[in-house]
Image (tube, rainbow, N blue to C red):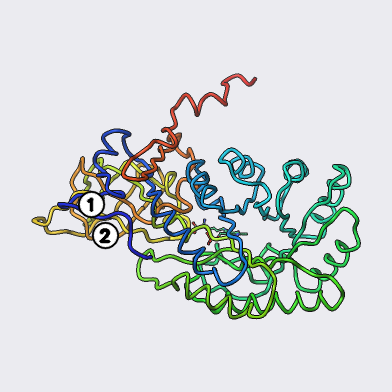
């Protein structure tokens, strides 16, 4: 499954058969391009890997929340992992089933909880005693029971970038085992809370199965302890986190990941819930950009492109590596070494450092692996308009989000105050 849907024909890069120069011509650059068939294929492969056990895949909306991407996954039967009221409305607008939604996150507001209860989401993944109290209160006021799961912090080291590691006890996420027991006892006794499951999420971009297996074992030990007290759980949610190959990483294939988890669940009846984000969408997306200038400077060679850290934040924020390739190959050229930088006024606005690239001004580059945490983390920094999103499916490219305009940006402000 690690073959990119971006392939070359006669030296030109295609997105699921559609030439990227045609997309750039039609919608301009920078632009995000997603291969829908690749997302569907990955969803099916992930789903098939878990076929031997009752399971539910709740796609982590934050990875790529474009409505067309959500609609595509909803049609395939995906549930959704959300972390805000905004993500909930996106899922509903995309035709997702609220009953298949799990609601994660440490700071759910009263209004978000009320709306989630109103539409009947599948489960609240509770992160603290105070939050459980707020949910209970809202459920009582709404006159309908709230389905809950407690997010436990299994205290395992996910061995990933510290910004995206979440399962250590010093992180803000989840509750410790003893505290979780108390929350379950309280919930089980409440007439307006319905204990459904248990969950954890130990981090993102994990490239080994051991931390997942460790976390599952610790969570299951707690499930058994609860069962001794007569508190029975219907599902175990292991979160997301399966990594992809950006550069040299060798993450496990989904069937290896699935086998490891299912081994831990052998003989058990709890439904397994999974919240994959990155694995489903990262490789299916590219950020298409054009070289504005070639700039030799102090012994370095900069390619100044029209995409920047506001469009794709990962390199600046996590020193993340994304492969950058010319859209049209020029085998006759000898590639030098270049830094690919954007127009934003920050030294961190580097999309790729020391890359073997010999692109010229006016030419197109594709920044690969940009389908996850790309557009979703884009901002208007430097008053730049966020790029459009294009979804290619069945050999046809469709604009699924238009380019933002300055009017869009300015519409919310007033020089004099409202
Ligand atoms: N479930 C929960 C509760 C999460 O917090 C996350 C991601 C996921 C599922 C999905 O994880 P995935 O399968 O995508 O690894 N912006 C960072 C990643 C932050 C991930 C946050 N939580 C990046 O660009 O690498």
Residue 176 - label: none
- Image quadrant where one finds the C terminus: top right
Sequence order check, earlier mark of 2 and 1: 1
Residue position for label 1: 326
Tell me: 64 left or right of 268: left
Residue 194's place in the image compared with 32, above or below, is: below
Tell me: 364 left or right of 78: left
User: Can you give x and y, in whole percent of width and height, for residue 391 in the image?
Assistant: 39, 43
What secondary structure is found at the residue carrying circle 2?
Answer: strand
Residue position for label 2: 355
Give whichever of 96, 315 is nearer the camera.
96
- Image quadrant where one finds the N terminus: bottom left
Q: Nearer the viewer, mark 2 or mark 1?
A: 1
Ligand 1 within 8 A of label 1's CB?
no
Residue at 18 percent across and 46 percent down: it is: 360
Residue at 48 percent across and 76 percent down: it is: 256
Tell me: 156 left or right of 7: right
Residue at 69 percent across and 73 percent down: it is: 269
User: Can you give x and y, in whole percent of width and height, for residue 291 in the image?
Assistant: 25, 43
Residue at 47 percent across and 69 percent down: it is: 254
Question: Which quadrant of the figure has residue 33?
Answer: top left
What secondary structure is found at the residue carrying circle 1?
Answer: strand
User: Can you give x and y, in whole percent of width and height, for residue 315 in the image?
Assistant: 41, 56
Ligand 1 within 8 A of label 2's CB?
no
Graded by Cα atoms within 10 Å as few (under 14), some (14 to 19) or many (20 or more), the crowding at tag 2 reads some
Graded by Cα atoms within 10 Å as few (under 14), some (14 to 19) or many (20 or more), the crowding at tag 1 reads many
Q: How many marks?
A: 2
């Amino acid at each position: 499954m690690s073959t990119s849907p971006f392939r070359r024909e006669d030296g030109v890069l295609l997105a699921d058969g559609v030439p990227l120069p045609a997309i750039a011509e039609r919608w301009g650059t920078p632009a995000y391009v997603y291969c829908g068939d690749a997302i569907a294929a990955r969803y099916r492969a992930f789903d098939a890997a878990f076929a031997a056990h009752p399971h539910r895949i709740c796609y982590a909306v934050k990875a790529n929340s474009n409505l067309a991407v959500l609609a595509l996954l909803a049609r395939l039967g995906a549930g959704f992992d959300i972390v805000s009221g905004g993500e909930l409305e996106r899922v509903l607008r995309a035709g997702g089933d609220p009953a298949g939604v799990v609601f994660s996150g440490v700071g759910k507001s009263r209004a978000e909880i009320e709306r989630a209860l109103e539409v009947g989401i599948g489960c609240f993944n509770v992160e603290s005693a105070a939050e459980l109290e707020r949910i209970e209160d809202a459920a009582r006021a709404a006159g309908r029971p709230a389905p809950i799961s407690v997010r436990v912090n299994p205290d395992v080291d996910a061995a990933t970038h510290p910004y995206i590691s979440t399962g250590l006890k010093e992180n803000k996420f989840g509750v410790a085992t003893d505290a979780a027991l108390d929350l379950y006892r309280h919930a089980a006794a409440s007439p307006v809370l319905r204990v459904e499951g248990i969950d954890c999420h130990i981090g993102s971009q994990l490239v080994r199965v051991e931390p997942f297996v460790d976390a599952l074992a610790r969570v299951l030990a707690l499930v058994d302890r609860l069962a001794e007290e007569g508190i029975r759980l219907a599902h175990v949610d292991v979160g997301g986190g399966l990594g992809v190959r950006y550069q040299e990483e060798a993450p496990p294939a989904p069937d290896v990941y699935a086998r490891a988890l299912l081994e831990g669940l052998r003989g058990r009846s709890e439904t397994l819930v999974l919240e994959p984000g990155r694995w489903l969408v990262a490789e299916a997306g590219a950020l298409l950009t054009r070289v504005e200038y070639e700039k030799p400077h102090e012994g370095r060679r900069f390619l100044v492109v029209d995409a920047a850290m506001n469009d794709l934040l990962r390199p600046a924020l996590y020193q993340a590596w994304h492969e950058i390739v010319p859209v049209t190959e020029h085998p006759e050229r000898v590639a030098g070494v270049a830094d690919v930088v954007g127009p934003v006024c920050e030294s961190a606005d580097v999309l790729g450092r020391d890359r073997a690239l010999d692109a010229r001004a006016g030419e197109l580059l594709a920044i690969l692996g940009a389908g996850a945490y790309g557009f979703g983390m884009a901002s208007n920094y430097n008053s730049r308009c966020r790029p459009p999103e294009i979804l290619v499916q069945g050999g046809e490219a469709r604009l699924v989000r238009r380019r933002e305009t300055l009017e869009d940006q300015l519409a919310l402000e007033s020089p004099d105050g409202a």
